[in-house]
Amino acid sequence: MNETSSSERVHIGFFGRSNVGKSSLMNAVTAQEMSVVSPMRGTTTDPVQKSMELLPLGPVVMMDTPGLDDDTALGSLRVNRARQTLNRTDIAVLVLDGTVGLTPEDSAILALIQKKQIPCVVAVNKSDLSQAELLLQGNTVVYVSAKTGQGIRELKEAIAKAVPSGDSGRRLIGDLLSPGDLVVLVTPIDAAAPKGRLILPQVQTLRDILDSNAMGLVVKETELAAALGKLPASPRLVVTDSQVFAKVAKIVPQDILLTSFSILFSRYKGYLSGAVKGVHALDALKDGDTVLISEGCSHHRQCGDIGTEKLPKLIRSRCGKEIHFEFTSGTGFPDDLSRFAVVVHCGGCMLTEREMHYRAKCAEDQNIPFTNYGITIAHLNGILERCIAPVKHSLTL
């Protein structure tokens, strides 16, 4: 990859009441006119985000949000979008108006950030107009002025210090390999495949293989049998796109480990165990039940789309029931999941680990089974045990 993908970058969100200077402050931090600035209340109507390099942090995603105190009819929709932005925020910057001090609304926003256990830096803006000091126990407080530039360097340093230190140890596939191992990656090229490139899960998996001093062989499912026949020795692992699981499982000998990109990502994003538990709820679906199929990206849907066409068809045919389906994509994910019998999610390659945890936890808190594409397809084709075998040590069932 030429640059770090959005899901792997630190997400920094600016939150606060309307007109406290969130947009101005973010423009000052990034030294770019990322957000429109105006004294008019509610100028920022939707979250604004941009991937960039921010020293001393490196690759980040900067996110500006509407005011969380907008109580108008339209404002409630804006507030909801700002709250959704919190779910993918790694570092929250709570912006206060130094000429006003800490308001009950500010305290409520801070409590929400703390409830979600998001590291927070409090930026007291307009400090050029006020010398009032705010004591916020347990929080880093920086006095800044978006207008004069006062404290901007200190704010950047505070944000950098708020990032959890050390390597999380998460690997997509590298911890399953030894140097010199061969992995075969099965990547269908159909109408939904992006022209001239591979999709992100395939690229990230291949990169982690190379980082492990192992070898990757990329083939289409139509060439898989021929490729395996030409190898002098069996590969360590075959990783396939989930939508051709059934076909690939018939080709790959039983003594060769098999899994999918989607299953690897469920482990990488930290929800593998819950997804394996949740998939069995598909066996209990009844006529009239509704299944939510959710994707983290917002690509253009085409004929034969896995989420809106292939999965519903497979679930209906295997369950033998009249099932209804609803679909979400991108950052949209319902807060209320009570009308769904099961949530079937994509692997989550475009979402941060924090947001995937949030979505899975949302379902868990409402007692709604939560699983993903690869685990669903493997289960419905009767090959789940085989396909989770390579990562079974990561399961807590």
Image: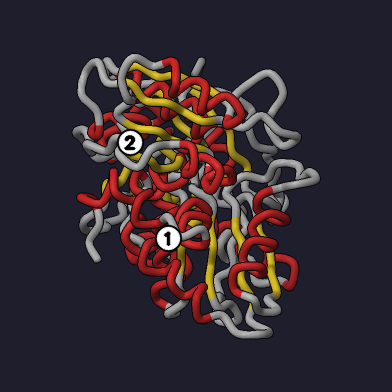
Residue bearing mark 1: 358
Q: Please, is residue 24 above or below residue 31 in the view?
A: below
Looking at the image, residue 328 sits to the left or right of residue 9; the answer is: right
- In the rendered view, would you say 89 is above or below 279? above
Drawn side of residue 25 relative to residue 191, left or right: left
Q: Is residue 130 visible?
A: no
Residue type beneath disc 1: Tyr
Residue density around tag 1, few if under 14, some if 14–19, many if 20 or more, within 10 Å: some
Q: Quadrant of the C terminus?
A: bottom left
- Is there a contact, CB below 8 Å, between mark 2 and mark 1? no
Q: Give left or right: position of 171 versus 17.
A: left
Q: Residue at x 49, y 34 (%)?
A: 201
Q: Which residue is mark 2?
A: 256
Q: Earlier in the sequence, mark 2 or mark 1?
A: 2
The kind of residue tagged 2 is Ile
Disc ID at residue 54: none
Quarter occupied by residue 259: top left
> What is the quadrant of residue 272 in the picture?
bottom left
Does any portion of residue 135 appear in the rendered image?
Answer: yes
The answer to whether 244 is drawn above or below residue 225 in the figure is below
